[in-house]
Image: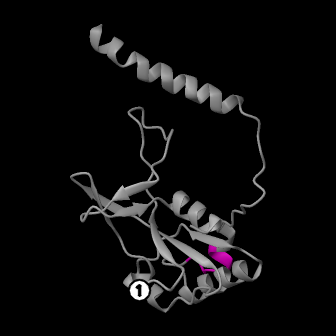
Amino acid sequence: MILQMRSLPEKLSSSILDAALIAQPHVAPSNVRLVTITDHDYEAIFNATSPLAAQKLGGLLEAISRGGAKVIAVDLDTSHPQFKALEAPSRTRVIWAVDAEETNGRMHPGNALGGRPMLPGSKIALAVVPNDRQGLVRAYRREFRNADGAAIPSLPYAAANAFTGK
C-alpha cells in the first residue's frame, strides 16, 4: 500500500499534464513543414531499397532547400558509408539525426553521412526521446552529454536553435 502511494503523485501529475495538453487549442504551425517519405515514395522514388539512394535523397533535400527552407532537419539513418557521397544543400542549414548508445549516463552518438565531416552550417543532433516510467513520452531533453561531458543537442532543440539563428 505504501509503495503504491509513493507513485501516486507522479501518476497524478502525469494525468493532469495529459489533460492540460488535450485541452489546449490546436495551433497550426506557420513556420514548419513536415516532408515525409511514404510507402509509395519509398517504392516509386527509392525503389524500395535500404539504405536510401544517396543521390536521390540529396536531390530531395536540394528541392526542399530551393523551396526556401531556412533549416532542414533530417531524421533518417545516414550512417551507411554510401552517404559520404551525398550532396547536401550548401545554402540551407541541415541538422542530421543520429542515434546513440548510453553508457553511465553519457551518450555515444553514431555517425551521420557515413562518418564524413559535417559541412559548414550543418551539425548532428540526437534522435533520442526519453520515456517515463509508464513508457510514454511527456517531455524531451534539450541536450545530452557525451563521454567527454560536452553537450549534444536533441534533434528538435538543434532545429529550433538553427531556425532562430543560434
What is the basis of the colouring in this image?
A: one colour
Residue drawn at (64%, 33%), measured in percent from left and top? 21
Q: Which residues are magenta?
A: 42-48
Viewer-proximal residue, 41 or 65?
Answer: 65
- Indicate the quadrant where residue 39 lies: bottom right
Farthest top residue?
A: 1
Residue 108: percent from the left, percent from the top? 29, 65
> Which amino acid, mark 1?
Pro
Please give left or right for residue 134 compared with residue 103 in the image: right
Viewer-proximal residue, 149 or 98?
Answer: 149
Residue drawn at (75%, 83%), measured in percent from left and top? 66
Viewer-proximal residue, 161 or 80?
Answer: 161
Residue 62: percent from the left, percent from the top? 67, 84
Residue drawn at (45%, 83%), measured in percent from left and top? 118
Residue 151: percent from the left, percent from the top? 37, 62
Residue corresponding to mark 1: 117
In the rendered image of this protein, does residue 57 appear above or below residue 106?
A: below
Viewer-proximal residue, 5 or 50?
Answer: 5
- Indicate the quadrant where residue 59 lies: bottom right
In the rendered image of this protein, does residue 48 appear above or below residue 140?
A: below
- Indicate the quadrant where residue 102 lies: bottom left
In the rendered image of this protein, does residue 157 appear above or below residue 10?
A: below
Residue drawn at (40%, 83%), measured in percent from left and top? 114
Residue 77 painted magenta: no
Residue 87: percent from the left, percent from the top? 56, 90
Q: Which quadrant holds the C terminus?
A: bottom right
